[in-house]
Image (tube, rainbow, N blue to C red):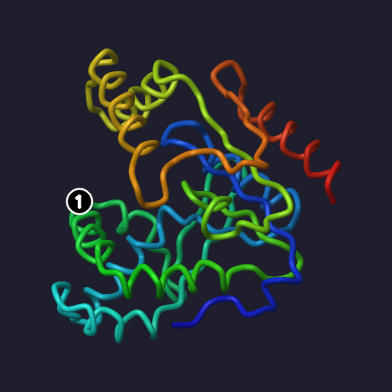
Amino acid sequence: MTGPAGQPEQHPVITIDGPSGAGKGTAAAALAEALSFHLLDSGAVYRVAALHAVRCKADLTDEASVLAALRTMHAQFKPRGLDGVDVFLSDENVSQEIRTEKAGNAASQVAVMPAVRSELLDEQRAFRQAPGLVADGRDMGTVVFPDAQLKVFLTASPEQRASRRAKQLKDKGITANIAGLVDEISERDQRDASRTHSPLIPAKDAIVIESSDLNADEVIARILEAWRQVS
């Protein structure tokens, strides 16, 4: 598997962890663009890996077959500021394709394979190159980059995240029940925080930003100020 080259220990990293809907993807992309840093959207890594494995005709039930495919994968994440991130597999923009149900199901299959998880952990760490990296995910500061110079845990109330999710669905022509979304988000938060493997919790040295009453520009300004204090 190939990824950005570099000496990981020599390059700065900003990690932004948090639950879905807190705005971490938008913040990470905007920060990467503002600082001219590289970007890692770890939430997309397994989907890209699964898509590549499928294209290589790997057997998604066979760990060795999937691993062989992953060693020829080259993923890139290109920030678009407040518009988010474009995901590339080699030179092809696969941002839309990896969000399909088919890609999600394939990602679920490969994500349970220990050797695949280990391979993709190395892949994520390989994105750490000069002049620096912004890594967006759920365990970036606790597992993937525990020595990051700045760790942010970005969160928001279940109600605010449900409202944001409902708007996204509405934009796609899908009607959503806010109360139902709040319940789903709250249940997922509890599961994620209590799971044994990589629980969704702030790193001990992370700064926690509650974004319920903040817009994207305000969140980014706070993180940039924190970065100026440590860099």
Task: In this rendered view, identify the residue nearer to me: 162 or 206.
Answer: 206
Does residue 213 lie above or below 142 as drawn? above
Q: How many marks?
A: 1
Q: Residue at x 67, y 58 (%)?
A: 147
Q: Is residue 45 left or right of residue 169?
A: right
Q: Is residue 54 left or right of residue 74?
A: left
Q: Position of residue 9 (x, y in %)?
A: 71, 71
- Quadrant position of residue 217: top right
Task: In this rendered view, identify the residue nearer to me: 127 or 186.
Answer: 186
Q: Is residue 105 left or right of residue 95?
A: left
Name the secondary structure under disc 1. Answer: helix
Task: In this rendered view, identify the residue nearer to me: 76 or 196.
Answer: 196
Identify the residue position indicated by label 1 in the image.
Answer: 101
Kind of residue at badge 1: Glu
Q: Residue at x 66, y 60 (%)?
A: 133
Does residue 147 lie above or below 218 as drawn? below
Q: Position of residue 206 (x, y in %)?
A: 65, 40
